[in-house]
C-alpha cells in the first residue's frame, strides 16, 4: 500500500531536470548537537505538485535489495529513520520504508440485497463527510509510458494490471492487491506532471457524502460521481490546491497472480459505465411520500 507525500513548489522555481537533489544552506540541529544540511527534493513540474511517493516494504531485506538495484545508475540515500530515498525515471522522488500494514476496521457490511442479508436489526451508517482509509493510487503524465513501465516492473517488481492501448499503463505494487497503485498516461505535450491522487473510502455512501461536503465547501467538481469500467470502482474527482486533482473512490477490483491484463481503447466512452459531469445538487422538490403540509 503506498504512502504519498504532497508538498508545494515555489512558482518562480524552474522544473528540475538535472541532478535530483538540491542542497540549500539552511541547517538543522540534531539531538546530539551535530549540525547537518537539509536536503530539499525539487519537483517534476512548476507549482504545487507531488514530490515523493513512499512505498511500504515488509522487511529490511527488501530495502537492501532495492538499494542494490537502484544504486546501479542513480543516487540512493538513507534517512535517520532508515527509509531509502531515490528517484524514478520520471524524476519523481520515490522512497521505501519498512512498515507493518494497518488493520482497517469495517464496522458492518455496508449493504443488504435480496440475495445477501448482511445487516440485521441495525440501521445503515450515514456520513456527513468522508474520512479516507487509504491513499489508493497516483496518476502521472509521462513523456514515455513504456520507459516507466519497464522501470517499475523490471527493477521494482510491480505488476501490470491493464493497458490503455498506446496511451497508458495501470500498475500495482504487488501481485495480490488493489487494481492499481500507479497509473502512467502519455503526456500530450511531452511534460511530466501530476494528474491526480486518489483516496479510498469505505463505501459509495461515504463517497457521496464526501463529495457533497466538498461541494458545500466550494471545491469544484472536475467530474463525477461515476463508475469506472477499468477497476470497477466508483469515483468522484475534485480540483486540488496541492496540485492536479483529488479523487474519492470505493469498491475497487482486487487482483491476484492469476489476473491477465486487458487492453482498453482509451476513448472517452470507456472512461466510465456512467458518470455525472458536475457533481450532485440537493433537490428542493417535494418527494412523492410528502405533502405540502409536511413542509416546515
Image (cartoon, rainbow, N blue to C red):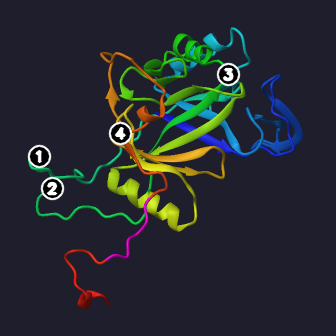
Q: For the residues marked 3 and 1, what is the alpha-carbon distance in whole angstroms?
A: 47 Å
Q: Nearer the viewer, mark 2 or mark 1?
A: 1
Q: Earlier in the sequence, mark 4 or mark 3?
A: 3
User: To which residue does mark 1 refer?
Assistant: 116
Q: Secondary structure at mark 3?
A: loop
User: To which residue does mark 4 refer?
Assistant: 273
Q: For the residues marked 2 and 4, what is the alpha-carbon distance in whole angstroms?
A: 28 Å
Task: Tell me: residue 48, above or below residue 130.
Answer: above
Please give left or right for residue 163 compared with residue 295 in the image: right
Q: Give the image quarter of residue 134.
A: top left
Q: Secondary structure at mark 4?
A: loop
Task: Tell me: residue 94, above or below residue 196.
Answer: above
| Picture coordinates of residue 226, whole percent (x, y) | 40, 46
User: To which residue does mark 3 refer?
Assistant: 143
How packed mark 2 is, by other alpha carbons closer than 10 Å (few <14, some 14-19, many 20 or more), is some
- Would you say the residues marked 2 and 4 are in contact, meaning their CB atoms lie under 8 Å apart? no
Q: Is residue 83 visible?
A: no
- Would you say the residues marked 4 and 3 are in contact, meaning their CB atoms lie under 8 Å apart? no
- Residue 119 bears which disc, if any? 2
Residue sitting at x 65%, y 14%: 70
Task: Tell me: residue 78, above or below residue 211.
Answer: above
How packed mark 4 is, by other alpha carbons closer than 10 Å (few <14, some 14-19, many 20 or more), is few
Please give left or right for residue 59 compared with residue 74 in the image: left
Question: Between 127 and 218, which is closer to the camera in this rendering?
Answer: 218
Q: For the residues marked 4 and 1, what is the alpha-carbon distance in whole angstroms?
A: 24 Å
Amino acid at each position: 500500500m503506498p504512502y504519498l507525500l504532497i508538498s508545494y513548489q515555489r512558482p518562480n522555481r524552474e522544473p528540475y531536470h538535472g541532478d535530483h537533489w538540491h542542497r540549500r544552506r539552511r541547517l538543522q540541529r540534531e539531538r546530539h548537537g551535530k549540525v547537518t544540511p537539509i536536503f530539499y527534493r525539487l519537483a517534476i513540474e512548476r507549482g504545487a505538485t507531488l514530490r515523493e511517493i513512499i512505498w511500504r516494504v515488509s522487511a529490511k531485506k527488501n530495502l537492501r535489495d532495492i538499494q542494490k538495484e537502484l544504486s546501479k545508475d542513480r543516487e540512493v540515500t538513507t534517512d535517520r529513520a532508515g527509509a531509502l530515498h531515490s528517484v524514478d525515471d520520471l524524476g519523481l522522488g520515490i522512497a521505501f520504508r519498512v512498515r507493518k500494514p494497518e488493520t482497517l476496521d469495517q464496522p458492518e457490511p455496508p449493504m443488504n440485497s435480496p440475495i445477501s442479508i448482511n445487516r440485521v436489526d441495525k440501521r445503515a451508517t450515514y456520513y456527513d463527510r468522508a474520512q479516507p482509509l487509504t491513499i489508493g493510487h497516483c496518476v502521472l503524465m509521462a513523456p514515455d509510458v513504456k520507459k516507466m513501465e519497464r522501470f517499475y516492473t523490471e527493477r521494482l517488481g510491480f505488476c501490470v494490471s491493464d493497458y490503455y492501448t498506446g496511451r497508458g499503463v495501470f500498475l500495482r505494487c504487488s501481485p495480490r492487491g488493489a487494481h492499481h497503485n500507479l497509473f502512467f498516461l502519455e503526456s500530450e505535450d511531452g511534460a511530466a506532471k501530476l494528474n491526480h491522487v486518489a483516496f479510498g473510502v469505505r463505501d459509495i455512501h461515504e463517497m457521496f457524502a464526501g463529495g457533497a461536503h466538498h461541494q458545500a465547501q466550494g471545491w469544484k467538481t472536475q467530474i463525477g460521481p461515476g463508475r469506472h469500467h477499468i477497476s470497477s470502482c466508483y469515483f468522484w474527482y475534485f480540483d486540488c490546491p496541492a496540485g492536479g486533482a483529488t479523487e474519492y473512490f470505493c469498491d475497487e477490483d482486487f487482483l491476484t497472480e492469476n489476473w491477465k491484463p486487458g487492453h482498453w481503447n482509451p476513448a472517452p466512452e470507456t472512461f466510465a459505465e456512467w458518470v455525472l459531469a458536475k457533481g450532485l445538487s440537493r433537490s428542493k422538490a417535494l418527494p412523492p411520500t410528502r405533502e405540502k403540509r409536511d413542509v416546515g
